[in-house]
Image (tube, grey):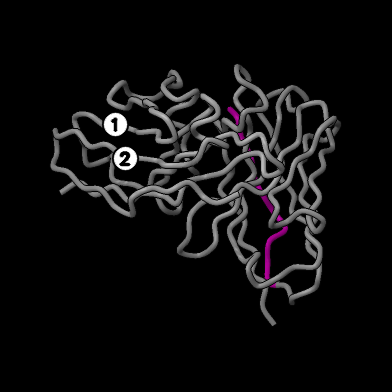
Amino acid sequence: QSALTQPASVSGSPGQSITISCTGTSSDVGGYDYVSWYQHHPGKAPELMIYDVNNRPSWVSNRFSGSKSGNTASLTISGLQAEDEADYYCSSYTGSSTLYVFGTGTRVTVL
Amino acid sequence: QVQLVESGGGVVQPGRSLRLSCAASGFTFRHYGMHWVRQAPGKGLEWVAAMWYDGTNKYYADSVKGRFTISRDTANNMLYLQMNSLRAEDTSVYYCAREIAARPNLGYLDYWGPGTLVTVSS
């Protein structure tokens, strides 16, 4: 089971919107609506931002939204803020022997 | 409040064993599935192992299958990861994490510990 593919970096100015892609296969992202996204500030514990492709935990800002088309899932951050600067990882259920797989990670930089 | 605290990390020689522990508090441990996730230096997150809330099912990444064993002590709110035949590529920060209650067994992790570093080196 290979890691899901994400761009290494994405950047934007404060107030802008950015989108991070997460590409897998029909065996993971494309086969199930069980995609999640995590925000990870280095040195801290990762934080769940999205689950079930587009559901937000109650503590997550509505500036974060998720979607999926075919084998690619996406995370959109609207109204970019300095505190959004972090690493972001997607994850998917696979139904295979390696039951879950993470993406390669995307470093978001706020210019 | 929910707390997860890992321990047991350190420097170990290739081929040796190590057991990681995760102390859970602030929630009813026996009601939640638990996972181990790791991050090698400068690399991304990698899912390692999971155990259902009732202990009936355990799952492992192919990279650790046959070498690592996940277990839990519900009476003492502890999660463990027994790591045998360690390799240099197992060098990582290891996190324990809790599944969200609303959607069990899908790998959605809402609380994570601060992690413990395992270094495999001669």
Instruction: Determine whether, in the image, residue A20 is placed left or right of residue B108.
Output: left
Given the image, on which type of amino acid does mark 1 rest?
Thr
Q: Is residue A11 above or below residue A49?
A: below
Q: Quadrant of residue B110?
A: top right
- The answer to which of B40 and A4 lies nearer the viewer is A4
Residue at the image position 75 percent from the left and 41 percent from the top: B59
Q: Which residue is mark 2?
A: A20
Residues at circles 2 and 1 in contact by the CB criterion of under 8 Å? yes
Q: Report the front residue among A94 and A45.
A: A94
Kind of residue sitting beneath label 2:
Ile
The quarter of the rendered structure image containing the N terminus of chain B is top right
What is the crowding at mark 2: few (fewer than 14 residues within 10 Å), some, or many (at least 20)?
Answer: many
For this view, does B81 lie left or right of residue A10? right
Q: Is residue B98 above or below residue A87?
A: above
Which SS type dominates the magenta stretch?
strand
- The stretch of residues the image draws in magenta is B1-11
The numbered dot on residue A76 is: 1
Identify the residue shown where x is 82% and y is 26%.
B54
Q: Which residue is painted at 82% across and 56% down in the image?
A: B66
Residue A70 locus on image (x, y percent): 42, 30
> Could you say which quadrant of the image residue B82 lies in?
bottom right
Q: Could you tell me residue B115's position as x and y percent?
A: 59, 51
How many labels sit on residues? 2
Left or right: where A90 falls relative to A32: left
Pick the front one: A88 or B30: A88
Q: Nearer the viewer, residue B30 or A16?
A: A16
Q: Quadrant of the C terminus of chain B?
A: bottom right
Q: Position of residue A94 (x, y in %)?
A: 61, 36
Callout 1: helix, strand or loop? strand
Tell whether A23 sits left or right of B13: left
State whether discs 2 and 1 lie on one chain: yes
Mark pair 2, 1: CA separation: 6 Å
